[in-house]
Amino acid sequence: MTAAWAEPDVRRQALHLAGSLASGGLLTWAVFQLVPGGAPLGFALCWYFAFLTLYWLVERDSHSPHEARDRVTTVLLATAALVAFVPLVLIMYLVVSKGLPTLIGGFPNFFTRTLEVFGPLDDATTGGGKHAVIGTLQQVGIATLISVPVAVLTAVYLNEIGGRMAPVLRFIVDAMSGVPSIVAGLFVYTLWIVRFGNDFSGAAGSAALAVLMVPTVTRTAEEILRTVPGGLREAALALGSPQWRMILLVVLPTARSGLVTGAILGVARAVGETAPVLLTARGSRALNMNPFAEPQDDLPLFVYALIRTPNQSLVDVAWAGALVLVLLVLTLFVIARVVGGSRPSRS
């Protein structure tokens, strides 16, 4: 009975949408005939405004003003989602269409070769980004080892312990969240390279990435710790457990999946950064397995350096690197979604 009633209502709503859209288009077209020289963007905006007005009038007459506002708001939210989704699809299409032929055409050359002996007459499928992929994994791995423990301990202090320094520390974390990535690179460059005279290296790039990861992971971890039921803390304390043991054996295991998600989101935040690594790791066309000595390349630097060259083969290799970077970030977000959607861990 409910399904039989809902189907005509859905059909009626679809007719209202289609009728309002068509009527708004005709009304806008008629107005623009009187005002020659209108821009296509202006026509689209006027059409959309007329469509919303007519749809609100139709729904108000069919149901009620309150329900009409709800349905118009639903249309606005759907439009906003579509506007945000279309550029993402276009970007993915551009990267895949330009990077996939090079990546597939010479597979697995991209993952087994470098650009150390790549010549101006070589084909794009013979080039590779092995040095950039390894550099990315090493730099992000070191940055994760530095930032995640610091961020989780900071979140534990802010949410579980508190104290007089908690508001100041939270303010610092919030301020760091808005720091431009190039500022983090300048900080490490000034302190590590200029002040102490060290060379450009992958470890210096990792330090800059860690500065960017700490506030992201801290805020995420703090929000996750807030979701842990207070009854678990009270039960542990009532059984005579000290606070440190309660945090270590009850709170952190319960929030484990969320903390892992926050760490992955922090990695995804840092893996695509170019400016801080440009000032600290410098980049290289040769493979450097030691991130603590000499310049080292990574995928963002790899793409940034090659996309500006006049050699079309190198530009094609850069698009292949961009595709690998996008797939890496997409994989991290999927892992974060899967881990974050799992059931809370139990101690």
Image: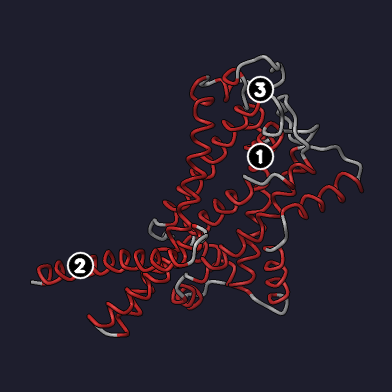
The residue wearing badge 3 is 114
Q: Is residue 150 left or right of residue 15?
A: right
Report x, y in % for residue 86.
Answer: 46, 52
The residue at 62%/21% (across/down) is 127
The residue wearing badge 2 is 10
Under circle 1, the secondary element is: helix
The residue at 18%/71% (across/down) is 9
The residue wearing badge 1 is 300
Q: Of the residues under marks 2 and 1, which one precedes in the sequence?
A: 2
Q: Quadrant of the N terminus?
A: bottom left
Report x, y in % for residue 41.
Answer: 50, 59
Frontmost of labels 2 and 1 is 2
Under circle 2, the secondary element is: helix
Mark 2 vs mark 1, CA separation in Å: 48 Å
Q: Quadrant of the C terminus?
A: bottom left
Residue 44 placement: quadrant: bottom left
Q: Amino acid at mark 1?
A: Pro
Q: Nearer the viewer, residue 127 or 271?
A: 127
